[in-house]
Image: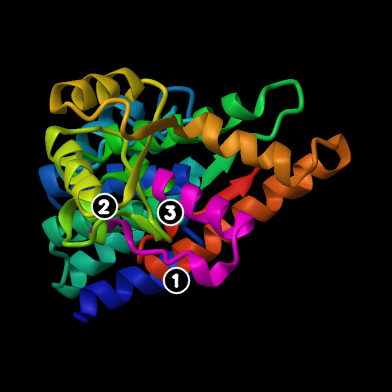
C-alpha cells in the first residue's frame, strides 16, 4: 500500500468518516481538488449563510459516482445538510493541502480511493425484510425481492434478485426438510450456468429457481423429463406467465410444475408456524436466519444478507 493510501486510511479512521453524508463530502471535495488543483481555499466552499458546503448536493455526488459505475444513491441530500459536513470539509481541505505540501497528493488516486469507500459502504448494507403484520406474507416476500431488483438496476451486471430468490428457497427447503437433503450452492454456480440438472435435487424432483425464465431453462426441464425426473420451476409472480408460455411452446406444459415464489415461500411459513399468529414471526426469523447462514457459506458478498426491520 502506498504512503498516500495509508494516510487516507488513517485519516478516515481517526475522523470516523464512514457515514453516507461524510463520504459524500469527502468525495465532493476530492473531485474539486482533482478539477481545480491543490491547494484549496476552504473559505470559498462555504455558502453565504455559512451553514453548508457550497456546491455539495445529491446531483453532483451521483454524477461523480456514475464515473465509477456506481448508480445507487448515496445520500438524498448528498451530504449537504448532514450535521458536521462543513467542519468535515474544512478539516479535509487542511489534510489535502498538507498532502500537497508533502508532494504525495495524487488527486485522481484520492478521488478513486473515496469512491471505493462508497462501494464498501454499499457492500455492508443488507436487505431489509419489513415484517408488518398488516401486510400479507406474500407481499412481505415480494417487497424483499423488489429491493433486490432495485439494487440490481442500480448496479448493472450483478444479479441480486436471482441470488436472493435462490437462497430464500434454499432456506425454506432446509427448514421443511432434513438439512442433509438440501444442498445449497453459490448463485454464480446456479444450474442455469453449470452442468447440474437443477438448483436443488431432492429424490426425483429437480427444482429450478429463476427470476427470468428462458428457452434454455425449459429445454433443461425437457431433459429432466427425459431422464425420468420431475422438474419444478419457481419464479416470481411477474415472470409466471412467461414461464407457462415457454412451457407450452416446448410442448411440456402439463408435465412440469411452475410455482410463484412469493406464494411458495409464504405458504410454508404458514404451515411451519401451524397457522398460529404467535409462531408466525418466529418462523420468519428462522427463515431469515437460515438464509443468512446460506449466504455466509456460499457467497462472498455480505450485502446479500437480510435483516428484519
Q: Let me know if residue 183 is in the magenta part.
A: yes
Q: Which residue is mark 1?
A: 297
Q: Quadrant of the C terminus?
A: top right
Give the quarter of the image for residue 79.
top left
Give the quarter of the image for residue 242.
top left
**In-front residue for pair 60/199:** 199
- Circle nearer the viewer, 2 or 3: 3
**In-front residue for pair 306/32:** 306
Q: Is residue 102 above or below residue 256?
A: below
Q: Earlier in the sequence, mark 2 or mark 3?
A: 2
Q: Residues within 10 Å of mark 3 (few under 14, many from 20)?
A: some
Q: Which residue is mark 3?
A: 303
Residue pictured at 51% horizontal, 31% vertical = 262
Q: Position of residue 292 (x, y in %)?
A: 54, 59
Residue farthest to the right?
278
Look at the image and tell me whether residue 159 can be seen.
yes
In the picture, measured across the screen, residue 175 lies left or right of residue 170, that is right
- Circle nearer the viewer, 3 or 1: 1
Residue pictured at 21% horizontal, 81% vertical = 1
Residue pictured at 52% horizontal, 72% vertical = 180
- How many marks do you count on the picture? 3
Residue pictured at 35% horizontal, 23% vertical = 240
Magenta segment boundaries in residue numbering: 165-188
Q: Earlier in the sequence, mark 1 or mark 2?
A: 2
- Circle nearer the viewer, 1 or 2: 1
Q: Earlier in the sequence, mark 3 or mark 1?
A: 1
Secondary structure mostly seen in magenta is helix
Question: Do callouts 2 and 3 mark residues in contact (Cβ within 8 Å)?
Answer: no
In the picture, measured across the screen, residue 109 lies left or right of residue 171, that is left
Q: Which residue is mark 2?
A: 115
- What is the distance, in whole Å, between disc 1 and disc 2 at their CAs? 28 Å
Amino acid at each position: 500500500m502506498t504512503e498516500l493510501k495509508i494516510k487516507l486510511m488513517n485519516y478516515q479512521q481517526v475522523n470516523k468518516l464512514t457515514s453516507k453524508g461524510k463520504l459524500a463530502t469527502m468525495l465532493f471535495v476530492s473531485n474539486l481538488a482533482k478539477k481545480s488543483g491543490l491547494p484549496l481555499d476552504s473559505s470559498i466552499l462555504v455558502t453565504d449563510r455559512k451553514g453548508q458546503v457550497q456546491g455539495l448536493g445529491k446531483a453532483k455526488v451521483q454524477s461523480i459516482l456514475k464515473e465509477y459505475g456506481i448508480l445507487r444513491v448515496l445520500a438524498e441530500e448528498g451530504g449537504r445538510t448532514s450535521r458536521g459536513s462543513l467542519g468535515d470539509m474544512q478539516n479535509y481541505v487542511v489534510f489535502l493541502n498538507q498532502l500537497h505540501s508533502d508532494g504525495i497528493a495524487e488527486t485522481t488516486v484520492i478521488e478513486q480511493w473515496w469512491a471505493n469507500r462508497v462501494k464498501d459502504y454499499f457492500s455492508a448494507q443488507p436487505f431489509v425484510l419489513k415484517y408488518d403484520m398488516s401486510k400479507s406474507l406474500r407481499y412481505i416476500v415480494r417487497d424483499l425481492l423488489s429491493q433486490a431488483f432495485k439494487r440490481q438496476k442500480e448496479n448493472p451486471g450483478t444479479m441480486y434478485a436471482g441470488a436472493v430468490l435462490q437462497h430464500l428457497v434454499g432456506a425454506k427447503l432446509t427448514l421443511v426438510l432434513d438439512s442433509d437433503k438440501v444442498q445449497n450452492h453459490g448463485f454464480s454456480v446456479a444450474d442455469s450456468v453449470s452442468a447440474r440438472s437443477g438448483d436443488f435435487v431432492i429424490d426425483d424432483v429437480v427444482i429450478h429457481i429463476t427470476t427470468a425464465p428462458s428457452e434454455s431453462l425449459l429445454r433443461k426441464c425437457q431433459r429432466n423429463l427425459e431422464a425420468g425426473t420431475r422438474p419444478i420451476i419457481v419464479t416470481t409472480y411477474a415472470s409466471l406467465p412467461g414461464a407457462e408460455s415457454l412451457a407450452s411452446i416446448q410442448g411440456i406444459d402439463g408435465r412440469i410444475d411452475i410455482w410463484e415464489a412469493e406464494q411458495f415461500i409464504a405458504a410454508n411459513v404458514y404451515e411451519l408456524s401451524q397457522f398460529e399468529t404467535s409462531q408466525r414471526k418466529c418462523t420468519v426469523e428462522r427463515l431469515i436466519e437460515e438464509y443468512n447462514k446460506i449466504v455466509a457459506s456460499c457467497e462472498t458478498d455480505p450485502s446479500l444478507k437480510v435483516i428484519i426491520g
